Image: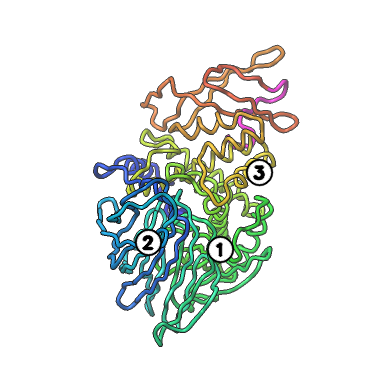
Amino acid sequence: MNLRSFASSLLAALASAATLACIILTPARPVFAQRLPDTVRPEHYTLTLTPDLKAATFSGVESIDVTIAAPVSAITLNAAEIAFQSVSVTENGKQQTAAVTLDNSKEQATFTFKEALPAGKATLAIAYTGILNNELRGFYLSKTARRSYAVTQFEPTDARRAFPSFDEPAFKATYDVSLVVDSADTAISNTPIEADTPGPAADKHTLKFSTTPKMSTYLVAFLVGDFQCTAGESDGVAIRVCSTPDKVALTAYGVDVAKWVLHYYDNYFRIHYPLKKLDLIALPDFEAGAMENFGAITYRETLLLIDPKTASTGARKEVAIVIAHEMAHQWFGDLVTMQWWDNLWLNEGFATWMENKSVAAMHPEWKIDQTVANDEDHTLDLDAQPTTRSIRAKAETPEEINQMFDGIAYGKAGDVLLTVENYLGPETFRKGVHAYLTAHQYANATAEDFWNAQTEVSHKPVDKIMESLVAQPGEPLLTFSEPAKGSPRRVAVAQRRFFLSPGIQPDPAQKWTLPVCFKTDNGQKCPVLTPADDTLPAPKTGLFFANAGGKG
């Protein structure tokens, strides 16, 4: 997800940043864990949805193929604002009807069966109805002056408003989606249309989409309306940028950017884009800047639609960066997904780091390194507040999870990755990214999986460096003395946490493990400073500069 336009305005003002940090860390009411048991895991969903845009409602028919690890007499999954018509389960040819119990506070539904279900395979069959809400989340109505559209926004915990589901990122499954829509309308989902058949009513047609790869619920998307698109192709992938009919003339620039970025990412990741098509869709009403649904990325209109002939360089740069951010997620977030929301930074920090790398290669004249430096200043201001949080923080409930989407998960996490890349060198870092993605594709991963892959590839203590930076709040300030004479040349160094307010005294026990990159005649040399160190080897001769590249 991209919150760039929202976050930049907040981070630019220290007072606002301090207020934001306070909000992030202070829940409005007591919260309790709402995690699902892992006794039952979904394998495949078959969904048929029929939206009624005039009535602002929809109906759904769903089957979920599940694997049961141990005998159970009840199955609990997520559902919100769903009215259940019928629920049954079939295992070994035997069907049972379920009693449904709702826990609205936890956004969960429990299906209870008279006879226990044995370990093994089973299929849930669910008929239900829901509302096309006006809250810009779940399955909702997006409106223009001319008509309404039915669209989705599921991250982080709103797929449950469109279909009963195991709505946690680790419960990956495949999906067969069908949409029954008005004859004059079309629909877009994660994968290409496989079949388009008339009916079931005379004024309807049914669009069936091909089976998705294994993916998390929050990445599912379906959009209904009279969308029109401009098409292109890159590396054998069909690319479209779509909008409402009155704005289709503004879609060509997005196609050109997406074509360039997809080829760049194919080469960088050395893993070909995993789907047959990529759609980028501009929505009239959209809360986030953009959302990385697998194969069907959704955008706020102002962050995708543009006339490059009349737009400023700043506007073209912003659109390109947001496109690049969401496309980076197709690998880092969609193909490989964090195990749980406490590692959201794995998604957003990486996409923030990668957006700048790709756009800098596409348009070197834009001087993206200056944008990176400016953004880092804002992030440092935020992280120098006493109310900041660590990159990895507790997040159990929907309320806590939503609070994770902030300048720490995006900006600080991206800057940490920039620091590690600078330490290892771009090619070694890229090999570590490839190793991580290859090991966990179509599955889930943790922060430890990422930094262990980088450690194994580089044979350097990336694990200790990243854990130090990810687990602790705040930022280190290093103070160097005059380099001592003699050989080998060493320099005394002290570290402490930096606060913007000089009245705050840091905890002297808080220290980091950090690469310190000294500028040398041949480039840079990066010894590692640990909490136990008070000196470091310094360059033998020449000027003393302890933040080579300005990327520490």
Please identify, in this view, whether the residue under mark 3 or under mark 1 is nearer the observer.
3
Query: Which quadrant of the structure image shows residue 152?
Result: bottom left
Disc sitting over residue 430 in the figure: 3
Residue lying at the far bottom in this picture: please name it. 202
Tell me how far mark 2 sits from mark 1, CA to CA: 64 Å
Q: Amino acid at mark 1?
A: Ser
Q: Nearer the viewer, residue 472 or 56?
A: 56
The spot of residue 291 in percent (x, y) is 47, 58
376 sits left or right of 145 in the view: right
Q: Answer with mark 2 or mark 1, whichever residue precedes in sequence.
A: 2
Residue lying at the far front in this picture: please name it. 93
Q: Nearer the viewer, residue 5 or 196?
A: 196
Q: Residue at x 43, y 46 (%)?
A: 12
The spot of residue 202 in percent (x, y) is 40, 87
Element on which disc 3 rests: helix
What residue does disc 2 label? 94
Q: Is residue 154 above or below residue 252?
A: above
Decide: marks 3, 2 in contact (CB < 8 A)? no
Tell me how far mark 3 sits from mark 1, CA to CA: 33 Å
Range shown magenta: 539-552
